[in-house]
Image: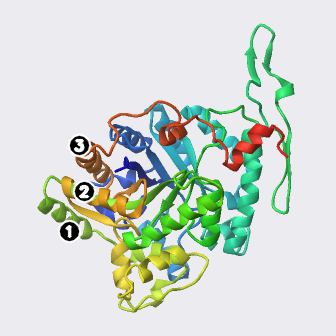
Amino acid sequence: MKQIRLNAFAMNAPVHQSPGLWRHPRDRSTEFNKIGLWLDLAKLWERGLFDGVFLADVLGPYDVYGGNARAALAQAAQLPANDPLLLIPAMAAVTQNLGFGVTVSLSYENPYQLARRFSTLDHLTGGRVGWNIVTSYLDSAARAMGADRQRAHDDRYAVAEDFMTATYKLWEASWEEGAVLADKTRGIYADPDRVHVVRHESPYVQMEALHLVSPSPQRTPVLYQAGSSPAGLAFAARHAECVFVSGPSAAVIRPRVARLRQALVAAGRAPDSVKVFALATAITAPTEAEAHDKLADYRSYVDPVGALVLMGGWLGVDFSVYELDQKIRYIDNDAGRAAMENFTRADPNRDWTVREAAAHVAIGGAGPVFVGSAAQVAESMADWAAETDIDGFNLSYAVLPESFTDAVELLVPEWQARGIYKTSYAEGTLRTKLFGEGPLLSAPHPAAGFRMSQSGR
């Protein structure tokens, strides 16, 4: 059995995937505005030898429910949502190995500015940063950025292809290896002959620039992606190094992973060249009875309206107009093709009701919740990983930091005893730790071609 990889799944907000749990007496989520919480979490995650933290983000409020953001505000449903990038240098300062995968939507970014920020973060973290590439799904974000609504789903991926090429040129082609001399004797910091202006001209991106930042340890950050639509899958097969999947059962996840592996081969890459992380929540305790008592306690704080607010944003459906016992049918819309499939296709013999779907996502979001003693949860998650062919988990939480503390102190030792979880960190950058290779992207990844050609064209 292959080693299990583990990311913490978090958000710079009072609620991420478990609406209502911020009210729990042991929960610290309302401290999200204080750097001390994030320093404590970073040290905890590194103590548990987590590969990294996967930081989610949205650029607009969840305003589908009721046609406005009132419910999202009242229930703190990913609102307020602070900038996740600003957490990274602080957390990096108190850790040595923890990676940082951060969500940034390219739909509302400029490649030149984004490349600069990620190169800076890669320098400051010593090569521990990754970019979760998203194209956004909330129309509220589009309106905030001056558009009536977001682009059509597949059009967003056409823009994304263009955007990635432009950033690769900046990260990989603008500065040659050895361009930085830092020669105090001759008074030359960088060799001008080894720094190049790169150009990109397309319907979506026009750029003529040299990259403002010298090559960072990884040049291109580790690339994460979560799209599972046909367009998203094709994009992942070309660009992603890590892919995030979510679904309530192995029956949903297994074919998605298989399709990804097939798409990688079709794109000329090895089927195992991407690490796949599945959303999951673990509720564990020394005994099974204690774990189920803990789950019952957590459920007493669940906010069903908050769950419907989040579902409404994910699926593009205003659940305020539905009766709780109304059946959910497959809805083909831009916001939630894959998410709606989770509920309507997970069990071919079951029609989910609004109430059932809300209860399912109320703790941990759209992924499975594993409940039991540490030994039971460790075995169940390991079996689930093997059955679905994933590489690890993006571990969500119910109560912060209790859920992560339980994982570090109870779950991780069980996996280590089974020989399926590391007992120490490998040396090197985030990319090196994940793949056991060098710090830079290599062929056949498209980014590597720009570095080899040194042309930017």
| Marks 2, 1: nearer the viewer | 2
Q: What crowding class fits label 1: few (fewer than 14 Cα within 10 Å), some (14-19), or many (20 or more)?
A: few
Q: Is residue 25 visible?
A: no
Instruction: Give the foreground label among 3 and 1.
Output: 3
Q: Secondary structure at mark 2?
A: helix
Q: Is residue 204 left or right of residue 27?
A: right
Could you say where residue 366 lies in the image, as x and y percent from the top left? 41, 70
Q: Quadrant of residue 192?
A: top right
Distance Cα–Cα, label 2 vs label 3: 11 Å
Q: Would residue 191 be found to the left or right of residue 426 on screen?
A: right
Left or right of 312? Residue 37 is left
Q: Gap between marks 2 and 1, in whole Å?
A: 22 Å
Q: Measure the C-alpha gap from mark 3 to mark 1.
A: 29 Å
Q: Position of residue 442 (x, y in %)?
A: 65, 41
Find residue 296 and name its label.
1
| Residue found at x 28% / y 49% | 407
Which kind of residue does numbered mark 1 sit on? Answer: Ala
Crowding at mark 2 (Cα within 10 Å: few <14, some 14-19, many 20+): some
Mark 2 touches mark 1? (CB < 8 Å): no
**Among all residues in the image, which is located at the extreme top?**
185
Viewer-nearest residue: 340 or 405: 340
Check disc 2 and report the residue beneath it.
379
Establish if 127 lies above or below 19.
Answer: above
The structure residue drawn at horizontal position 46% and vertical position 85%, both measured from the top left corner, is: 320
| Amino acid on which disc 3 is placed | Ala
Q: Which one is earlier in the sequence, the residue at label 2 or at label 3?
A: 2
Residue that appears at 59% across and 71% down: 229
Kindly identify which numbered label has been placed on residue 417. 3
Q: Which mark is residue 221?
A: none
- Measured as percent of width and height from the top left, residue 98 is found at 45, 39
Residue 408: % across, % down: 29, 45
